[in-house]
Image (cartoon, rainbow, N blue to C red):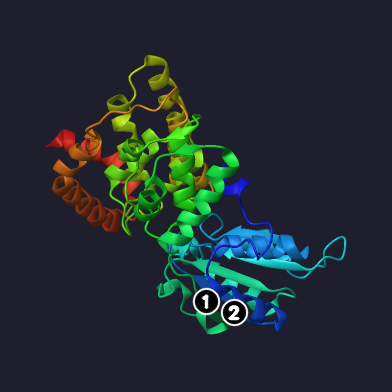
Amino acid sequence: MWVNKYKPKNLNEYVGQKDAVEKFTNWIKNWKRGKSLLFYGPPGTGKTCLIETFAKENNYEFVEMNASDFRTKNEIDAVLGQSMKQSSLFGRKKIFLIDEADGLAGRQDFGGAGAILKIIKESRFPVVLTCNNPYDESLRTIKEYSHPVEFKKFTVFDIERRLKQIIEKEGIKIEKDVLRILSKKNEGDLRGAIIDLQSLSHGGKEIKENDLDSVTSREKEQSIFNALMMIFKTKTALAAKLAINNVDKDPEEIFWWIENNIPNEYEKPEEIARAYDVLSKADLFRQRIRSRQNWKFLAYMIDLMTGGVAVSKNEMYRKFSRYQYPNNMIVLGGSKFERKEEKEKLLELSKELHCSTRKIRKEFMPYINFSQ
């Protein structure tokens, strides 16, 4: 992936964000125990990259954890608990990054924010958190111990300059104005622009302006139709995974959108078979999340249903596909009120019979329905 291949090796190669870099370097020089930094800003603005680059240049041990993957107190303690107190095996300094801290939300994250706060207070090494939304309610207490640092969208000129460096190193020919248009389409997201550039090259040595038709503008809230187009049109797993970052839908709902639209995009039987095979594996993780409430499986489910489906095709289809609303969700939508009424009845019976609604549905409802 070019986003990894062309990561900066030192802070001199780091693109833009001059104010954020200055605040970070001053903070790290004067770091005091019990305080952290909170990087915030849109996706693709270099928040994680800055920490990685600093650690690489200064020979720090870089310890990263994604708060969306490890949500509970026990999970966070298992990943970072001991490491924050122990010195590195070879005496190197450490720096901790807790990515997507605003991903902590809901009952499944019980104790997660408290565990992160404890790490900030007790860690012997600097801790940096990243988030997209600094005003998220889950960060309210954490912000009291964190200094906020804003990462702004990259300018069109910053993105264009970086893309030009990449195509020169890759030896790719490009039509005039393509880089400027691509830079504008990504709306300040450098990572997204690099991913799009690699996707457009698709193994060739020339990019033409009409190739940009397959690239959609990145908006704050990406529509499900644009996300599906990215998943089905791209040839890289990472680009497909990132396509759902800004979609305001639950991963399970996105799963059904993908499942329903594979035949609308892919034409060859072997491609359709591979896509459904990898989606069936994603479905196994989906079921385990529901049955065990183990949210660590969510990362595997997303990887398979996006990246796995994306790489199932032989070549990218340069055609317009009309994506359709999932059939099963249409059925569920039509029976919404009936299911609501049934749930209310089950809850009433649950109180009277002192047992779970699941047991009532399984053991009592067949007799009740039969008697009616």
Q: Which mark is residue 149?
A: 1
182, above or below 120, in the image: above
Residue at x-position 78% and y-position 63%: 59
Indicate which label's residue lies in the foreground, 2 or 1. 2
Measured from the top left, where is residue 270 in percent x and y? 42, 16
Label 2 sits on what residue type? Lys
Q: Nearer the viewer, residue 330 or 212?
A: 212
* Residue 20 found in image quarter: bottom right
User: SS of the residue at dot 1?
Assistant: strand
Measured from the top left, where is residue 243 in percent x and y? 40, 46
Q: Nearer the viewer, residue 279 or 93?
A: 93
- The answer to whether 71 appears left or right of 329 in the picture is right
Residue at x-position 35% and y-position 50%: 181
Query: How many numbered marks, from 0 up?
Result: 2
Measured from the top left, where is residue 269 in percent x and y? 37, 15
Distance CA(mark 2)–CA(mark 1): 7 Å
Q: Circles 2 and 1: CB distance less than 8 Å?
A: yes
Q: Circle 2 sits on which residue?
A: 23
* Residue 359 found in image quarter: top left
Q: Nearer the viewer, residue 121 or 41?
A: 41
48, above or below 168, in the image: below
Quadrant (top left/top right/bottom left/bottom right) for the N terminus: top right
* Residue 79 found in image quarter: bottom right
355, above or below 207, in the image: below
Residue with the most extreme top position? 269
